[in-house]
Amino acid sequence: MNIGIFNWRDVEHPQGGGAEAYLHEQGRLWVKQGHRVTWCTASVPGRPGHVCLDGIDIHRAGGRAGIYAAAPLLHRRHLRDADVIIDAENGIPFFTPLFTRQPVVLLIHHIHTQVWRRELPPAMAAIGHFLESRAMPRCYRHRPIVAVSESSRHDVLELMPAATVTVIHNGISADLAPGPKAPRPELVFVGRLKKYKSIEVLLRAVAQVDRTLPLHLVGRGDDEARLRGLAAELGLTQTVFHGFVTDAEKQRLLQQAWVAVNPSFMEGWSITNIEANACGTLVIGSDVPGIRDSIQHARTGLLVPYGDVTAFADAIRGVLADAPRRTAMEQAARAWSQQFTWARAADRFLALLKDVAAQAPG
């Protein structure tokens, strides 16, 4: 097949994350099977306009916002012969049905209703909310949709009750495995440092548990300066901001941590939870859409009320003090993680793409 992708970033983008990994990991497997994959995405200063990564042809144009305006031109230049197009909605889709008659599959990680208000100025938030909640349902009402969790599927159906939504979970690297734990308790968070990730809740919880408790924050984002200031204000002497790290270093930090913590406001699925599980580490997370899909409460980790600093502190304190319970959760977490593979996701998604392309008129 000739598969086209519109996604606002690619895996080399400085702010790339789970949404980019989701398509890249599957795309490279499709290429290995003999399919052609072409990815159109935003340009990045200092990066080439065209690159081939793992066999995926990536074309960049338009920048952060301009990529949406550049999409029709990118389509004419690079995707006119595609058998099917994946239109990835990261808050705003590309509205590909307006400029192509090719079959389109809409990919949604999560609905951004509340995130708009947290991340953007009021005027821009209102535009984003309108495009996602009003324009998107009208444009894609007859198109197949892929969601990455049951929570996301539920949210999509609230916006588009008649939609056909298929859930295809994220996978994880087969190389992830348990390793030695740190001799003393350590915590880890992996993800972008964004306001909606609510990392300040984690910082305040650590301050309640033990200000000298090592906390590793892996990732970067526009909330980093504020979080660094808060960590200093709270006297968290052992909190380390690692920024971006290699896959090997991320695995080491996930392995040695006694607990991974995910206080985010919402996620589509939260691949980092499953990556932690694969490394033999339980996760304490917010009881919100996406995270409640990837954490099995009281089995692979714990779910606590969103934003409740004391509840997070109590949960962290409890599992750190209870070695038998922690060991049982680590074992269950490892077993849970093994069912989420990129090969399984790629096979399911490819089968859907073939079906959609076969049903297209002409």
Image (spheres, grey):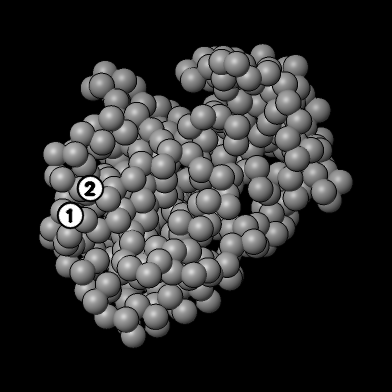
Specify the quadrant that holds the C terminus. top right
> Circle 1 — which element?
loop
Residue 136 numbered tag: none
215 left or right of 13 in image: left
Residue 26 image offset from top left, x and y in percent: 68, 49
Residue 159 image offset from top left, x and y in percent: 38, 43
Q: Earlier in the sequence, mark 2 or mark 1?
A: 1
According to the picture, the residue beneath numbered tag 2 turns out to be 237
Relative to 264, does residue 139 appear above or below in the rendering?
Answer: above
Relative to 112, does residue 288 appear above or below in the rendering?
Answer: below
Residue 145 image offset from top left, x and y in percent: 55, 46
According to the picture, the residue beneath numbered tag 1 turns out to be 211
Mark 1 nearby-residue class (10 Å; few <14, some 14–19, many ≥20): some
Residue appearing at x 40%, y 82% in the figure: 328
Residue appearing at x 47%, y 79% in the figure: 331
Mark 2 nearby-residue class (10 Å; few <14, some 14–19, many ≥20): few
Relative to 355, does residue 362 appear above or below in the rendering?
Answer: above
Residue 168 is at least partly visible in this image: no
Specify the quadrant that holds the N terminus. top right
Gap between marks 2 and 1 measured at Cα? 7 Å
Whether label 2 touches label 1, CB < 8 Å: yes
**Amino acid type for the residue under numbered disc 1:** Arg
361 left or right of 148 in image: right
167 left or right of 31 in image: left
Q: Nearer the viewer, residue 212 or 303?
A: 212
Q: What is the number of callouts on the image?
A: 2
Q: Nearer the viewer, residue 89 or 201?
A: 201
Residue appearing at x 29%, y 48% in the figure: 239
Residue 226 image offset from top left, x and y in percent: 24, 32
Question: Looking at this rendering, what residue extends furthest in the right direction?
Answer: 34
**Amino acid type for the residue under numbered disc 2:** Thr
Q: Quadrant of residue 151?
A: bottom left
